[in-house]
Amino acid sequence: MLSKNKNKLILSLITFFLIFSLVNLAFAEEAVENLNEQMEELKNILNSPSTYSAFQIRMLLNTAQDLLEAGILFEDTRGIIENSVEKSLDAYNLKKVFDVILETKRESLPTKSLINKINEGLAKNVNNNIIISVISTKAEKLKIADEILNEARQDGLEINGGEEIVEILADSLENDVPQESLSWLLKMGTKEGRSIKEITEISEELSYLSLLASDLGLTAEKISLLFKKAMSSSSNIEDICENIQKSLETEISTAKIEGEVGETVTGTPPTTAIDSGIISPSSEESPADIGETPTQEAGEAPTETGGAPEEPSTSPTEETPSPPEN
């Protein structure tokens, strides 16, 4: 009886694996068929009126297939090719663009921001080399952000939706937030038991503060020093952000004073802090601009400009005498 039940179990398992294999085979055949149809569509797009040679088209199709097999959506791949053909993007530059996306995808990093930047650059007719430089820089920031996140995971940070926080950290890095500051943020956030939402909000706040510092004209090195000084002054995240804000307010005041001194010396208007705290040129024109009438001295009545000149007044003694009577 036991032997009979055992044989039935084995037969059931064999049947299950056969069905499973047949289903997988059917899916695999369907996937291959879909891929072939997709590649044919991409080939037709590349063969549409363009400057690409037959060799270049084969090169691009091979890389496009690698993208699709790596998991890049067909709609994204097709969109880049369509935009590249429309804007006459050089074939080898398009290959470089594909290579950056492919390498990023193979490292299990998010690629959506790269694809968006590519399409945005093409839509705005940005120089090919600039597009490649921008997405290459973005890809490097994504790698660093992923390293920061992995370090935090090793320290015990539990994270769901890692791609989203990698994107946020990469944006902060692009805004010149120092890498060590973001590493510190994740470690302290983990230690204080903060949620991912709280940590990402603080990361965005640090990005804002860093942009504020850049608008003041601070170099990346000075921004890094400012952040380090703030981190060494406290172990509390809120205190750190507040200290950075205070340091920036000091920089704003200094810049404003220096601007006023510069106006006294050169006659150029100072910069003024607007409500957001970002420094921008004053909208008031300098009275010493060429072609303007100098400002009146204090206490003098203003004179009208552009009117007809007044007739000079004459005293009674200076009036011409009337002719003598006959």
Image (cartoon, grey):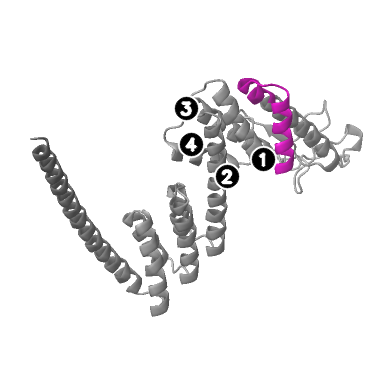
Q: Is residue 136 magenta?
A: no
Residue 223 is inside the magenta segment = yes
Q: Is residue 179 left or right of residue 103?
A: right
Q: How many marks?
A: 4
In the rendered image, is residue 98 in sight? yes
To which residue does mark 2 refer? 144
Q: Distance between the Cα atoms at labels 1 and 2?
A: 21 Å
Vertically, is 138 above or below 60?
above
Comes first in the chain, label 1 or label 2 = 2
Q: Label 3 vs label 2: CA separation?
A: 20 Å
Q: Which residue is mark 4?
A: 165
First in residue order: circle 3 vs circle 2 = 2
Other-residue count near label 4 (Cα within 10 Å), few / some / many at <14 / 14–19 / ≥20 = many
Give the extent of the magenta segment.
219-243
For badge 3, the amino acid type reads Lys
The local secondary structure at tag 3 comes to: helix
Q: Are marks 1 and 2 in contact (CB under 8 Å)?
A: no
Along the horizontal axis of the image, is 218 left or right of 322? left
Q: CA distance from mark 3 to mark 4?
A: 9 Å
Q: Is residue 101 left or right of residue 248?
A: left
Residues packed near mark 1 inside 10 Å, few (<14), some (14 to 19) or many (20 plus): some
Name the residue beneath numbered marker 1.
214
Secondary structure under the numbered disc 2 in the rendered image:
helix
Looking at this view, is 293 or 135 the one in front?
A: 135
Q: Which residue is mark 3?
A: 197
Q: Residues within 10 Å of mark 2 (few under 14, many from 20)?
A: some
Q: Quadrant of the C terminus?
A: top right
